[in-house]
Amino acid sequence: MLKNLSLAWALAAAIAAPESAAVGQLNDPAAAERIAPSAGKGLRAGNDDILVIGIRLRGEAIGGVAPVRRIDAGEIASYGAGTVSDLVEALEPETRGNSGAASPPQIVLLNGSRIANFSDIGGLPAEAIQRIDILPEEVALAYGYPAGARVLNLVTRERFRALTLDSSAGAATRGGRYSLSTDWNLARIRGESRIIVDLSLARDGALDESERDIPLAPAGPLFAAGGNAAAPVFGAEIDPALSALAGTIVTVAPVPGTTQTLAQFAVGAQSPAQTDLRPFRTLLPETTRFVLGASISRPLFSRIAATISGRVTSTRSESGFGRAPVELFVPDANPFSPFASDVLLLGLAPAPLRRDSRTDTARLSALFSGDFGLWRWTATATGEHAYATTRDSGRVDTAALQARVLAADPAANPFAAIAGPFDPAARLSSSRSRRGAIDLSAAGPLARLPAGDLFLSLSASAEHLGLVSRGFEAPGPARLARTQTWAAASLDAPLSRGNASLGGLAANFNVTVRNIPRFGWLRTWGAGLRWAPDPIVSFNLSYIDDDGFPTLQEIGEPVVPIPSFLIFDPIRGETVSVTRLEGGNPLLHPNNRRERKIEAILRPPGAAGITLSVNYSEVDLDNPIATFPIVSPDLEAAFPGRFQRDGSGRLILVDARAISVASSHFRGLRSGLQYVTQPAPGDRNPTRFAASLFHTWRFRNDIRTVAGGPVLDLLDGAAVGPRGGVPRHLIEGNARLTRGALGAFVSGSWQADSLVRGGSGDLIYADRPRLNAWLFLNLGQLGSASSLPAWLRAGRLTLSVENALDARLQVRDAAGQTPFAFHPAYLDPQGRTLRIGFRTFIK
């Protein structure tokens, strides 16, 4: 009993200490779990005695779930991140899910509360964050979010004020590509009040094919300046008389520059004219981006706060696709034709074919939050408007010229006209979308159970969406509208409060219903179990059955063709230039996802700072949405309407719009090891080191395209993307080291090789290493910093290198050759990139 009383007095003193002292004691998440009642654990005072003491940190998340990891201000600084966005990106490897598909974005809370939009706080300086709690995925349910990604709770400092300027410049070491950016942020935080204003400007230069080691495109049905003559059926003989003059069968010949006779055509027979289009084709577009945002948060009453935020964004990109192809059909009866049969003239428009895309968005949000007794509630209203346009220039209209050629107009010599000029034919597609939404959520204790509070979360939402779109060839605009509603409830029940035999045990059950026009009522339900038999180990089990649906954009975006898109056709074993269609598909279906997951986290005793984690998941989907930017015999057999070929069997068009496939399945294991040094108490300038290593092992990843059709094993020979099949193994790691003014951050990954089987032979995708490095110097921590101006003392110099190994994906066929469409510059055009930056505060 005396031992118990002594322990109680010691903990009572800790509770009475200032928050900063409590934070220092709780930097170790395991320690936090031993103390915080929200972890559902207690302290062992004797063999069977359990003592539960409550400490609630400022900004702690609701729901009573202990964080997987807690990151203090010192460790935050060791990342060298400039903004909250950079910080969240750096944490992505340890917050990513293991679902086998694209992981949902992290859910971010601020001071334990919902935010209207992450972009409202993304530009906030990382120095404004006092700590970060990485929370399990089920915490998302307590805030009315769907499960699927871990939750980041960012807790700001009590007081912070600064004007931040961050500018950087970067360039690819192979040349051709540059980038410039500047960001301004004004932030003022005082308790629950904050003002954030940010302005961002960025520009990335275009990267042309001529700036990389890409050879000329392989021979095919060549379009060239000046024109080539060919038979209407590709590869057929043009004219026996021409073949007789040339001494060989002639299937293509350049158009002579003077009078057109058979003898002149015979001179260049089988040596078609070629035009170098590499200077007019971009590997990466030129882009500019402008962002202006503001967010103001104020307490209205003692327990109610309001946040008003707005944001405008303008993005523009310019791409080059070479020069528009021109085709003229010349009948044998045309007076200018020397041939005894019909021919095709294949030329190029004189002006480059360019595409200018622009997207402007505006958003306004109002969020109200407060406490009602022990319950916390939020209400959010959001309005968004977006306008996007895509304009092509350099296209031509040959309809009038073709009509004159067919009519044998004596003033329309097709062999001279094929060189241009032509009538211009600019094309424009556009889409205008709007969104209005109201979200309500409330969470708090419903009843008191022997093991703790029965916690209930309720949420509801109503959303109106509208989309007006018009494609290049559409006779008029297409209009879509949808008003969708949903409601959700989540119940957390503690089953054991941490007794000596069972430990901490809690269960969760959640359900969501949605009413989606056209798709009807959809439902989601799930359950989970959290068990911590000891403070050093915990287990999480979860199951979710989720009905999903396509977005309005996936259904109704305008169809936009991408001309001269190079793709490898494995059926014929050749690289071809096709038209690729992108945009919405009105025939998409609702889908269903069933996910089972078990996770174990271990913090070995006597090994401070080490955390081991293992996550196994199984995911089965019915009618998932997929895109197919590549060609394979299985895909073409399943969706023959998505691929078009000419009379010779040559591929000319690929419809890569989203499509619903029959099913997909995933099984995988993700394990991790993390180590963070524990600074000695009282060390005001510690050396900090942290490292993490994650391994993803995929046991199954396959797709069935149509019911009853073949299964495409993405781990063994199948692929649905241009970067090959899914590698069975993925290793990711990073390390951070800071000491005084200097800091370094290194991250890297490695993917195993993969094999893709095709009709004309197998393709081998080599393994893919990647390494990034980041160095920073805090000028204010230098020994001579006192003599520097204030703005320099607050400054930070950064040097980063992305893809430090200049690694590019290598693809080889069975003969060891690289198909033209898989040239490394197409797959990884930028390569190694160096960036230097300067950042400073004005307080």
Image: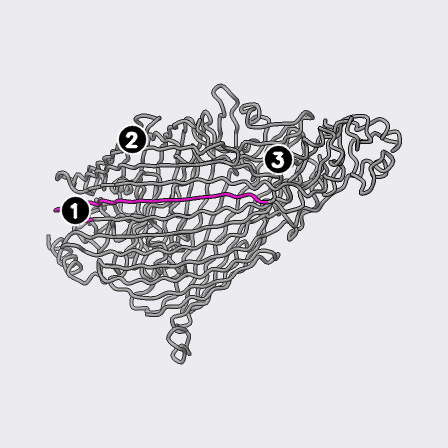
Place of residue 599 in the rendered image (x, y in percent of width and height, measured from the top left): 35, 39
Name the residue tied to disc 1.
50
> Could you tell me residue 616's position as x and y percent?
39, 37
Residue 122, image quadrant: bottom left
Reply above or below: 189 against 829.
Answer: below
Where residue 148 appears, as percent x and y from the top left, is 35, 39
The residue carrying mark 2 is: 514
Query: What is the distance, in whole Å, between disc 2 and disc 3 at their CAs?
Result: 41 Å
The answer to whether residue 384 is magenta is yes
Question: What stretch of residues is rendered in magenta?
Answer: 369-393
First in sequence, mark 2 or 3: give its number: 2
Circle nearer the N terminus (1, 2): 1
Point out the residue furthest to the front here. Answer: 410
Most frequent secondary structure within the magenta stretch: strand
The answer to whether one can see residue 655 in this image is yes
| Residue matched to label 3 | 578
Q: Are marks 2 and 3 in contact (CB under 8 Å)?
A: no
The residue mark sitting in front, 1 or 3, is: 3
As rendered, which of 89 and 529 lies closer to the eye? Answer: 89
Secondary structure under tag 2 reads strand
In the rendered structure, which amino acid carries the disc numbered 1? Ile
Q: Quadrant of residue 228?
A: top right
Q: Which one is nearer the viewer's eye here, 528 or 831? A: 831
Side of 543 relative to 762 (left or right): left
Counting residues from the start of the chain, the first of labels 1 and 3 encountered is 1
Residue type at tag 2 = Arg
Mark 3 Cα-neighbour bin, 10 Å: few <14, some 14–19, many ≥20: many
Q: Hey, what amino acid is under mark 3?
A: Val
- From the image, state whether disc 2 or disc 3 is nearer to you: 3
Which residue sits furthest top?
708
